Amino acid sequence: MLTALGLDSVGETVYRAMLRQPAAGVAALADSVGLSEGEVRDALDALSELALVRPAAGDAGRLRAVSPDIGMEILMARQQSELAAHQQRLEASRAAAAQLISEYAELRPAASHPGVEHLVGLDQIRDRLAVLTREVREEFLAFAPGGPQTAENRAASRPLNQDLLGRGVRMRTIYLDSVRTNRPTVEHADWLTRLGGQVRTVPTLPTRMLLMDRRIAMISVSSDDTAAGAVLLTGQGTLTALCALFETTWEAAQPLGHIVPTDPNGLTGQQAAALRLLAEGHTDETIAKRLGVSHRTARRIASELMDRLAARSRFEAGVRAVQQGWLPARP
């Protein structure tokens, strides 16, 4: 019954028996449910990993079952965490595929690949974008990573945004959570909202991307240097995948004016993303880039997470995060 929450039938049987007979030992539990003592011990190990049983107070050698209201909340929180991690891996895979297309286009003549146009340098990108935005009729979607937007970027985008929204084009933009503390970027986002645009934020974004009328995508060829170049993609299969990526990210994003929620472990999305990167062994520099924050802020977030986990190293922080259900165990 509870297999969807990560508890197999044997584990569930033993857990139910422990709730009925809180003082029973391994032998008594085995007799009551018709299992061998070895099977009961294996089930207790699994229940312990799921935090459904704990050492009894005053008797470290005996385990007691956690009450169902707490236990089921633990299982559901763990399942939600695993689903979120799976969704993130899926989104990362889609983004990696788009990035591969971009890099491949950079190595091959665009003429030999219908549906791919390569743009070199910021001036060429802006010139081409100015032409494309005049042709947009219904929808303009954007990933805007990199954290707070520079004054130059804001100034360059304003005329294009104003033209789009003035023509009734539906415009949705996703920034990083880090922009919430940057007043000029927030003011720019408020300006977009007043004109009819919609703005949300997420902890991390895979790459800079623009989607126009779901028929043209512009993607940066380098996530580290978005001004280096971009590719225009018009292939139907690629556009379908990129639009799905945007919609999935949009659903998970938070409106800019709303308070960023925390997960069952009390972590914001930014903190949870930093913890995942920390556990994967990324440097402060990489974490800072992915979150769109300064190196100093990245170090502070990492230090706070390690303090909360009582970890002396990043590796230990990753281990403790898995043990406490903050991160899903790796398969």
Image (cartoon, rainbow, N blue to C red):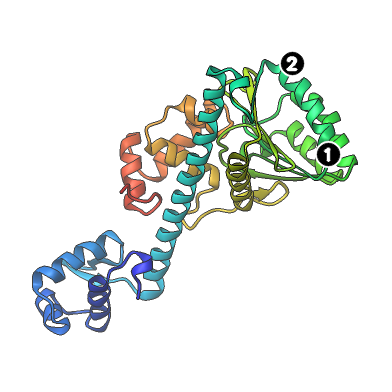
Report, in whole angstroms, how far the alpha carbon at label 1 lies from the one at label 2.
25 Å
- Res 191 label: 1
* Chain-order first, disc 1 or disc 2: 2
* Label 1 Cα crowd, 10 Å radius (few <14 / some 14-19 / many 20+): some
Q: Quadrant of residue 236?
A: top right
Q: Is residue 44 above or below residue 182?
A: below
Image quadrant occupied by the N terminus: bottom left
Check the image and name the residue furthest to the right. Answer: 166
SS under mark 1: helix
Give how far across and how far down residue 251 sits, in percent. Answer: 62, 53
Q: Is residue 46 above or below residue 260?
A: below
- Viewer-nearest residue: 58 or 304: 304
Determine whether, in the image, residue 87 is placed left or right of residue 49: right
Give how far across and how far down residue 43 sits, in percent. Answer: 20, 67
Identified at 76% across, 31% down, the residue is: 184
Instruction: Count how many numbered circles sit on residues in the image.
Output: 2
Give how far across and how far down residue 270 sits, in percent. Answer: 54, 42
Identified at 15% across, 84% down, the residue is: 32
Give how far across and how far down residue 152 sits, in percent. Answer: 76, 21
* Label 2 Cα crowd, 10 Å radius (few <14 / some 14-19 / many 20+): few
Residue at the disc numbered 2? 123
Identified at 37% across, 51% down, the residue is: 328
Residue type of the residue flagged with mark 2: Asp
- Viewer-nearest residue: 190 or 308: 190
- Viewer-nearest residue: 299 or 96: 96
Q: Is residue 82 above or below residue 72?
A: above
Identified at 17% across, 82% down, the residue is: 33
Do we see residue 297 in this rendering? no
Do we see residue 294 in this rendering? yes
Residue type of the residue flagged with mark 1: Trp
Name the mark nearer the viewer: 1 or 2.
2
